[in-house]
Image (cartoon, rainbow, N blue to C red):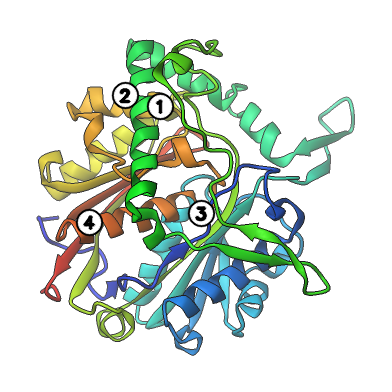
Amino acid sequence: MKNGDSMFPRARIPYGTWGSSYFPAWQMSPLAEVNIGQFAGEGANRILGKRKVPKNELEYLIIGSTVPWHWKFWTAPMVSSCLGQRLPGYHIEQACATGLQAAILGANEVQGGTYDVVGVLTFDRTSDSPVGVFPERRSYERTVALSDVWDNFGFDPATGNAMITTAGIAARKYKIDRREVDELTHHRYEQYFNARKTGFLDRVLFPLEILNLQGRMLGKVDDDLGVRKVTLDSLRAMRELDTCVTGGTQTHASDGMAVMLVTTREKARELSPRPEIDIQFVAKTEVRALPSLMPEAPTLAVQKLLKRTGLKMKDIAVAKNHNPFAVNDVIFSKVMDYDWRNMNNTGCPLVWGHPQGPTLTRVLIEALEEAVALGGGYVLIFGCAAGDVGIAAILKVTEGGGQ
């Protein structure tokens, strides 16, 4: 693949037709009390309306979530009904890679010529996540109860280790300095609060109302609840849970949704408020690291992707990632010889939380918005997922309509 090539020449992301809810921490908002699939569909309806995108333009819907929700069997048709359209579609799930993978699959549908306008809608509610009871004849208990979010975070069935353990193991492998981890975390919080202060986040985040069954106001989702300013001294004073990992240098569970469109170039020009902006998919890859080394997997994916495309980090205008542990970013900086201060300029999941399904969708939306503000360029999105998986993608933002 040469510089400037596109993996999906027919597919585009129309600028300004996207949006995300805020991501309140688990149990801190009315989202803890509603069907997240219904909320996501209604929220998408609200966001697309604000973006002046006619719903009847949608031809297909790809949804992504990772936590079971009521009526999940019905997937995209059920959610699209909540959006106000009767659309075909399907559901995908790949742990924390879901948000980016859904966009890639949307581009694949457009590239194949099946549809011209595909909605990509991702969401999750970690609050009150369900508990399932599974028949298990190999267990002396005969049945096993699984709390979907917490038990999966705490136990990888392939290794027996918790996700936090992967951060500690990776930190030891790369001889990470705890002081640098704390400094990086403090900087990430400053980036987020600066993005709020400048109004950048207002371009991509939408306050959404939640109604009860009687149609009365149950509450609003209008803040990344749970995010508080931190000091370097407070981070340094936190107890180490594993090597270089504290309560302050890892993300937190949260709830939320995000929506975007993938279309043909012609439809992108028709639907975007700025048709001169062209957003293309350049390349994507995934890797699987050795057992219990999840935080290094995204770096390995980026290395592979840059080699394939012939691009260098100096060619990247915006770099943004899903970083459940600050250790992820320190490893990336060390291996890639890249200053971690130059990435995640408008905030990141380390700070604003981790609802899993929509996490990388919000990352992608913020990154594209930042690239447009910079006048275009290559955008690098990457992150980790359960099973020691790393995913990475490069997109290209061009002003002037592209080639």
Residue 186 appears left or right of 149 = left
- The percent coordinates of residue 117 (x first, y second) are 40, 80
* Circles 2 and 4 in contact, beta carbons < 8 Å: no
The residue singled out by tag 1 in the image is 326
The residue singled out by tag 2 in the image is 330
Q: Residues within 10 Å of mark 4 (few under 14, many from 20)?
A: many
Question: Relative to residue 258, is residue 233 depicted above or below?
Answer: above
Distance CA(mark 3)–CA(mark 2):
24 Å
Going by the numbered disc 3, the residue's amino acid type is Pro
For marks 4 and 3 on the same chain, the one whose residue lies earlier in the sequence: 3
The residue singled out by tag 3 in the image is 358
* Circles 3 and 2 in contact, beta carbons < 8 Å: no
Distance CA(mark 4)–CA(mark 3):
20 Å
* Circles 4 and 3 in contact, beta carbons < 8 Å: no
Distance CA(mark 1)–CA(mark 2):
7 Å
Going by the numbered disc 1, the residue's amino acid type is Ala
Q: Mark 2 or 4, which is nearer the eye?
A: 4
Distance CA(mark 4)–CA(mark 1):
23 Å
* Circles 1 and 2 in contact, beta carbons < 8 Å: yes
For marks 2 and 4 on the same chain, the one whose residue lies earlier in the sequence: 2
Res 286 visible: no
The residue that appears at 78% across and 74% down in the rendered structure is 215
The residue that appears at 53% across and 59% down in the rendered structure is 21
The residue singled out by tag 4 in the image is 371
Going by the numbered disc 4, the residue's amino acid type is Ala
- The percent coordinates of residue 48 (x first, y second) are 47, 76
